[in-house]
Amino acid sequence: MTEPKKLLFVCVENAGRSQMAEAFLRKFAPDLQVTSAGTKPNVELNPIVVQVMNEIGIDLTNQKPKELTNQMIEESITVNMGCMDKESCPSLFVKNVIDWNISDPKGKDIEQVREIRDQIKSQVIKLIDSVQGK
């Protein structure tokens, strides 16, 4: 039996997009190892992100932003969620990164964050299919 692939979702603050992607992957592919992290992690998750994920039955209240480490990068297939802050963009530090270029939910209203959530869900499902060879 082979060791499951590790997936790493990265963004600058690890307070929104990467946390949603991690949660969707945990829900839809519990056999895969996943984490998320940021180059400049925020103190807490975006409360609107927590709310829109709760609307679909995913509880993020116990999640905390994490700092991106070299070990995480070395052990994982890395997905960059997109960058608004080009100087702190994780894709600057990671080779062979998958870049989704998804809008940052920071400062967006709830309807816009729902659209971002649904876009991330769709991308995660496609990623799972490609990683699992479907």
Image: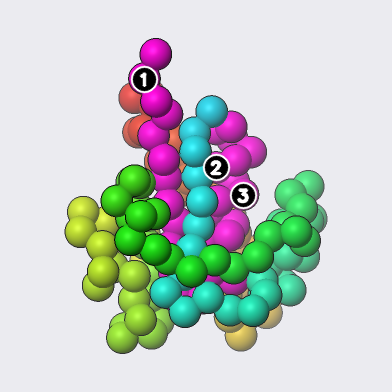
User: Which of the labelled discs sits on residue 2, or is there none?
Assistant: 1
User: Which of the labelled discs sits on residue 23, or is there none?
Assistant: 3
Q: Amino acid at mark 2?
A: Leu
Q: Secondary structure at mark 1?
A: loop
Q: How is the image coloured?
A: rainbow
User: Mark 2 and mark 1: span between their CA atoms?
Assistant: 19 Å
The answer to whether residue 38 of the structure is visible from this angle is yes
Spot occupied by residue 80 in the image (x, y as percentages of width and height): 37, 62
Spot occupied by residue 74 in the image (x, y as percentages of width and height): 29, 51
Spot occupied by residue 5 in the image (x, y as percentages of width and height): 39, 34
User: Mark 2 and mark 3: span between their CA atoms?
Assistant: 5 Å
The answer to whether residue 102 of the structure is visible from this angle is no
Q: Which residue is mark 2?
A: 25
Queried whether the magenta region covers residue 129, the answer comes back as no
Left or right: where does residue 60 sit relative to residue 120? Answer: right
Left or right: where does residue 86 sit relative to residue 7? Answer: left
Q: Which residues are magenta?
A: 1-30
Who's the residue at 78% across and 47% down the image? 57
Contact (CB < 8 A) between labels 2 and 3?
A: yes
Res 108 quadrant in image = bottom right
Q: Amino acid at mark 3?
A: Ala
